[in-house]
Image (tube, rainbow, N blue to C red):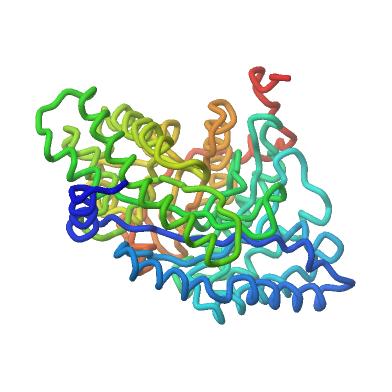
Amino acid sequence: MFNKFDVLETIDMIEREHLDIRTITMGISLFPCIGGDAQKTADAVYDLVCRKAENIVKVAEGLSGEFGIPIVNKRVSVTPVSLVCASFPEKACLVGRALDRAASRLGIDFLGGYSALVHKGTAAYEKIFIDGIPDVLASTERLCSSVNIGSSKSGINMDAVRQMGEIVKATAERTKDKDGLGCAKLVVFANAVEDNPFMAGAFHGVGEADTVINVGVSGPGVVKHALEGIPGADLTEAAETIKRTAFKITRAGQLIAKEAAKRLHAEFGIVDLSLAPTPVMGDSVAHILEELGLECVGCHGSTAALAMLNDAVKKGGVMASSHVGGLSGAFIPVSEDIGMISAAERGELSVDKLEAMTAVCSVGLDMIAIPGDTPASTISAIIADEAAIGMINNKTTAVRVIPVPGKGVGDSVEFGGLLGRAPVMPVHTADSSAFIARGGRIPAPIHSNKN
């Protein structure tokens, strides 16, 4: 039960420390929509999503008003569309555009699931589907896409890695009038999870129920404020403080998630307790790390500090919810975190350091602007490096980079809203193309044999 001190503390967390429910995401199975042809399937998809998610915005706004907790985003995720369109992959764009129209009608922020799962091999229909991603992202506004190219059980599909480097470049070119914005809606995964409520990587897994509510909570400002109250404390005490704070944050998420599922006639899925930053001052994961004693995120010690933060968040949150899932931990998207932006602009935060930090955080190289003339093979190599970290460490990793057309190191790009802004960061210019051209599959590590 909540006592008066819990209530006062929660009010303070909301008003002064940027506590919010970052997203309510409804996952919807599209398998009942598969029809005789592309147009019938697209029409059925539109009708189903509009019917199932008709009240998601209304319910979210009602819950926010009742409980006094801001709910920032209302989203939908769907079954990987490549599976729904397996018999007509060349016309999958019809389903993608139908989903985008549904998102617009519903008034939701993003819709995820224009996705393919090719971690062990790429079927012919999946290759056609993936080749069409740039055009679909260029012709839609709210649709998000993801491709899973590796896992700890299967290894890394290097043919898909090579293809995705080309797809990222093509998507940037198709949306060059918006500084490559399409790439902000495209993420390449290893070990993708089926219950992730966060975009751009959300999709509704084939093992999920028909309709599920997943909630993502966030509170970087709350964690930083808690650490400000223990200046000079050793790292053991800091970790304990973060755990207790994560428990309180997740408790609020559990309450909202279960009530939202009941009102939307869906199953309660999971609470994702990730610390997801925004470009707003006071809502930065980087500033948490600096509160721990780093002069600037990116300096030596950043990986250790992030490892402690990520682990403490998970330990605290898992006790507060009956179902913790998604990604859960701490995100480090450059353009979406004011502290990361500042460190990158100062030259203290490099892509190499970010790669090292992804070994211990929630996801991977996220929302990083790179020079527009970066070769597709270099982007593929970045994807392969990140996938290797995920494969070996049995964790989810991802790459969402934006090769900004016509811009280079020293320039910056403004995406606006939660996508923020980013300086164009340098990448290595030595050639990786011969390695990427080999193709094939990097075998799974020996510790994948657990049966």
Using the image as rendered, state which of residue 174 and residue 132 is in the foreground: 132
Q: Is 179 displayed left or right of 189 in the figure?
A: left
Q: What residue is at 58 percent from the left and 51 percent from the top?
A: 376
Q: What residue is at 56 percent from the left and 53 percent from the top?
A: 268
Question: In the picture shown, does residue 113 fall above or below 440?
Answer: below
Q: What residue is at 56 percent from the left and 40 percent from the top?
A: 381
Residue 255 makes an appearance in the image: yes
Q: Give the image location of residue 276, x and y in percent.
A: 37, 51
Q: Identify the image quadrant of residue 236.
A: top left
Q: Give the image location of residue 407, x and y in percent.
A: 40, 62
Specify the farthest residue to the bottom.
Answer: 105
The mark tally for this picture is 0
Question: In the picture shown, does residue 440 fall above or below 126?
Answer: above
Q: What residue is at 47 percent from the left and 67 percent from the top?
A: 74
Question: In the picture shown, does residue 224 fall above or below 64?
Answer: above
Q: Give the image location of residue 13, x and y in percent.
A: 22, 53
Using the image as rendered, state which of residue 34 and residue 265 is in the foreground: 265
Q: Quadrant of the C terminus?
A: top right
Q: Is 167 displayed left or right of 233 in the figure?
A: right
Residue 428 makes an appearance in the image: no
